[in-house]
Image: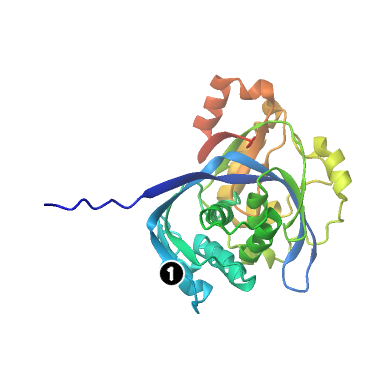
């Protein structure tokens, strides 16, 4: 007689790991800790990578009387697929770093559960690396949010933002999960209501080292700080068009170092009159974008031509609602 053996129960959670745009990006000062204080408005997009979290209810790790470090626990709890082309060593991957930071916070706050489920994370990568679209930071934030749910850690959004800030400066906005004004190193977030919009985004095949950019002698680091109220009230100066003092401080540096970015931005600038908007670069990466007036976004024939004529990969994307 054959005994029936129950199959392990596996459930999978799939989440969009969204991209972001910086509608403008200012650096106001350099901090004593080496980071830079910035001001920006983040716009989240309904476009990005996807993360799949598969959890087996029969595969758990006991943490009772465990002296394992957060790093050791991570190695026992996580399997990560789809990130091999990003980092050779899993410990260098932002997804792993995010999980490790979450566990470290739980250990430090003495809130680690007695048991934790093993999780198989599969990254379905769509966003190019180094584009200024926040792909890696978004992956890290999505990991923190979902593992907080799977492991029933029950940390608040503010606590998760604090954890995320230790992983990377752009991680907090993706934990916050909505358009926001950002200050500090990106962790001081204030909600902002912006009109729905479509964007033509170009991703040239170019990458400039971030550390090199921040060290560049021509990078402007002393933009006069604006109040939150000013940024909220002047959104017409940076949403559709880009009017002084709003700009991206990295644009002149990146375009001087990466001709492909200069070409992509020049292409979009040639469309500004028709699009009724101002082309610009996002973040400190290579991606450039053009906001589209509603009357233009609905002209599918025109937009299709712009995509076909673009000097590199081009996409029409909308904001996350």
Residue located 75% across and 35% down the image: 194
Q: Where residue 169 appears, x then y in whole percent?
A: 67, 60
Residue located 47% across and 65% down the image: 115
Which one is in front, 273 or 40?
40
Q: Where residue 307 appears, x then y in whole percent?
A: 53, 31
Q: Secondary structure at mark 1?
A: helix
Report the quarter where the C terminus lies. Answer: top right
Q: Where residue 294 appears, x then y in whole percent?
A: 68, 24
Question: Label 1 crowding class (10 Å Cα cut-off): few <14, some 14-19, many 20+?
Answer: some
Which one is in front, 2 or 283?
2
Quadrant location of residue 230?
top right
Residue located 64% across and 63% down the image: 163
Q: For the view shown, which residue lies furthest in the bottom direction?
A: 67
Q: Using residue 112 as the reference point, say whether residue 57 is left or right of it.
A: left
Q: Where residue 196 appears, x then y in whole percent?
A: 69, 31
Which one is in front, 299 or 59?
59
Identify residue for label 1: 75
Q: Is residue 105 above or below residue 293?
A: below
Residue located 74% across and 64% down the image: 36
**Residue 158 visible in the displayed image:** yes
């Amino acid at each position: 007689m054959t005994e029936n053996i129950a199959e392990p129960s596996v459930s999978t959670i799939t989440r969009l790991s969204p991209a972001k745009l910086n509608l403008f990006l200012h650096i106001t000062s350099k901090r004593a800790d080496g980071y830079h204080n910035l001001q920006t408005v983040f716009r989240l997009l309904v476009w990005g990578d996807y993360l799949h979290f598969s959890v087996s209810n029969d595969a758990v790790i006991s943490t009772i009387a465990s002296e394992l470090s957060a790093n050791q626990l991570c190695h026992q709890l996580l399997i990560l697929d789809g990130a091999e082309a990003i980092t050779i060593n899993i410990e260098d991957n932002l997804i792993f770093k995010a999980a490790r930071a979450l566990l470290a916070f739980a250990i430090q706050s003495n809130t680690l559960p007695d048991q934790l489920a093993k999780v198989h994370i599969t990254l379905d990568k769509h966003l190019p690396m180094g584009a200024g679209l926040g792909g890696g930071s978004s992956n890290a934030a999505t990991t923190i949010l979902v593992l907080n749910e799977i492991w029933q850690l029950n940390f608040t959004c503010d606590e998760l933002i604090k954890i995320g800030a230790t992983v990377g400066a752009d991680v907090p906005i993706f934990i916050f999960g909505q358009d926001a004004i950002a200050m500090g190193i990106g962790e001081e977030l204030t909600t902002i209501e912006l009109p729905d919009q479509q964007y033509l985004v170009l991703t040239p095949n170019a990458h400039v080292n971030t550390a090199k950019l921040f060290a560049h002698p021509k990078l402007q680091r002393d933009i006069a700080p604006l109040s939150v109220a000013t940024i909220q009230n002047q959104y017409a100066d940076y949403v559709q068009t880009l009017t002084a003092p709003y700009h991206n401080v990295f644009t002149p540096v990146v375009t001087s170092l990466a001709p492909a970015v200069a070409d992509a931005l020049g292409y979009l600038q040639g469309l500004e009159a028709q699009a009724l908007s101002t082309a610009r670069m996002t973040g400190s990466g290579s991606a450039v974008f053009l906001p589209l007036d509603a009357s233009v976004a609905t002209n599918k024939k025109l937009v299709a031509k712009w995509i076909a004529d673009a000097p590199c990969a081009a996409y029409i994307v909308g904001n996350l609602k």
